[in-house]
Image (cartoon, rainbow, N blue to C red):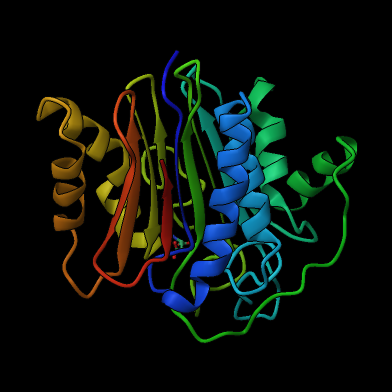
Amino acid sequence: MVEPAFVCHGGAGHGARDQPGVDLACEAAWDVLTSGGTALQAVLDAVMIMEDDPRLNAGTGGRVRDDGSVQLDAAVATSDGRLGMVMVIEETPNPVLVAAELLDEPYHALAGEGARTWADSKGIERTPVVGSPRPVATDTVGAIARDRSGALAVASSTGGCTGRPAGRVGDTPMWGSGLWCDANIVVAATGIGESIIEELIAYRVAAEHQRNGGDLGAALDWGIDQFSPEIQVGLISLDAAGGGRGLANTGMPWAAQP
Ligand code: ASP
């Protein structure tokens, strides 16, 4: 049996004020993992708790776009190669559920009103999302887990960055940029999505971890070093064997178990 492990974050750019919401999500996910639940269930439970927390920029409390809309992005991936990504969806307080529904479909990504209509067909409630005009540039929520079978999973969810037009998509639902998960490592990113996409950072941290012989701390240091200090960025990661960790070049509430 493998030792379970879990890490979640409340977004690069956020401070200690948001730590309680992140701690709550971590505790709930840890209960799932220590009761024999799957890594996928743990990350979904954690992200839903954070989506429902109006302090955090995901689901309820998601960033309001320049035109006043609340458009949300989310993604889920598992180490058995399944992937689901949803972009700029409206009227969906828990977009991570839509991403999770996509895991077993023959397509990976849905966007906009098409995604919302598809979510209707899956019975995912259509309801207005109360956004947050809070003037913070970045943040997102993310969770990664390893369960007793050794399976890894990641889920992330965001309202995007302040000052972005309707229709803009950041890194969060972009495979290889905002998230990566294979049998050896799982990575989630947060921060300025445009820069994270340019660096393809989640995949490249995984590649660096493999190149350096499995030193997770060094791979995260390397990842953060790819960004100039004025670009807010944070990473969480967990590999197949050890404990997980988070690292950011700015404030980032995060929590880990064990
Ligand atoms: N990466 C997200 C985005 O650009 C925001 C964040 O994580 O702070 O949409």
Q: Tell me the residue at 65%/20% (across/down).
A: 106
Work out which residue is located at the far left of the displayed protein and give it.
212
Near-viewer residue (175 or 35): 35
* Image position, residue 256 (x, y; %): 41, 48
Near-viewer residue (208 or 91): 208
Near-viewer residue (38 or 122): 38
* Image position, residue 102 (x, y; %): 68, 31
Residue 168 visible to an observer of this rendering: no
Q: Tell me the residue at 17%/28% (across/down).
A: 214
* Image position, residue 117 (x, y; %): 84, 45
> Which quadrant of the structure image shows residue 42?
top right
102 to the left or right of 172: right
Q: Locate the C terminus by quadrant.
A: top left
Total marks placed: 0
Height in image: 49 above or below 6?
A: below
Q: Locate the N terminus by quadrant.
A: top left
Q: Tell me the residue at 63%/35% (across/down).
A: 32
Height in image: 121 above or below 3?
A: below
> Which quadrant of the structure image shows residue 249?
bottom left
Q: Tell me the residue at 39%/73% (across/down).
A: 13
Residue 171 visible to an observer of this rendering: yes
Ligand 1 sits in which quadrant?
bottom left
101 to the left or right of 72: right
255 to the left or right of 109: left
209 to the left or right of 129: left
* Image position, residue 122 (x, y; %): 86, 35
